[in-house]
Image: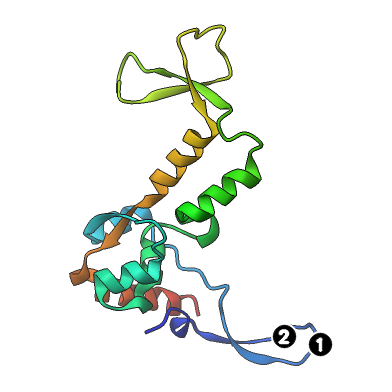
Amino acid sequence: MSYFSMFPEIVYDAKGNNKYTLMKDIFRRVKISSSARNAVMEYDYYDVQDGEAPEIIAYKYYGDAELHWTILVANNIVDYYHDWPMSSQTFEQYMKEKYTNPDAIHHYEIEQTSGDTTEVIDVGMNTTDYPSATPISNYTYETRIQDVKRQIRLIQPQYIEDFVEEFETKLKEGD
């Protein structure tokens, strides 16, 4: 079942000219709370490979590319163009457009010395108070963001049908 086929239809005046058309209510939103999402579903974790789209992953994992939307919902991805990891080619183009010098310093970091010592602290450009701070380039900074986006959750296949049914039910509850 395709994603938009589940949405209810509404009568809508798209042009504001009192000519109404039957359309899918694409403004309908279903919010599955993170606590419910975590409690009800068992997830597998997956690292998105270079150039993989949700459709490719859905086909590989569920055998059905049409379930791509479940991956987006499970990972709270609202804007595919900004929330999904870029391909290496798109990333390189993005870096050229965003930064005059990708190797320039973006910020400095210091290692945390108490608590979770695997964490680092971003100290901005303050090297006066932190002379031993490590410089982080624009390229490294942006690569880290992409690396975080690459780590996604997949609803385990044995739960996917229940998830789709629950999503449909929640869509209909908004009527």
Q: Which quarter of the image is occupied by the N terminus?
A: bottom left
Give the left or right position of residue 105, taking residue 113 as reference: right
Q: What residue type is labelled 1?
A: Asn
Q: Identify the mark at residue 17; answer none if there is no mark.
A: 1
Q: What residue is at 41 percent from the left and 82 percent from the top? A: 2
**Residue 14: x and y, percent?**
72, 83
| Image: 101 above or below 169 | above
Please provide percent x and percent y for residue 51: 42, 60
Secondary structure beneath dot 2 equals: loop
Q: Do the residues labelled 2 and 1 touch (CB within 8 Å)?
A: yes
Q: Is residue 79 visible?
A: no
| Residue under pointer 2 | 13
Q: Can residue 51 be seen in this view?
A: yes
Question: How was the colour assigned to the protein in this rendering?
Answer: rainbow
Q: Compared with residue 115, is residue 10 higher up or lower down, i.e. above or below?
A: below
Residue 67, numbered circle: none
Q: What whole-number distance in Å separates the C-alpha atoms at marks 2 and 1?
A: 7 Å
Under tag 1, what secondary structure?
loop
Residue 122: give x, y in percent of width and height: 48, 23
Q: 20 and 106: which one is in front?
A: 106
Q: Does 3 sit left or right of 45 as displayed?
A: right
Residue 140 drawn above or below residue 36: above
Instruction: Name which residue type carries label 2.
Output: Asp
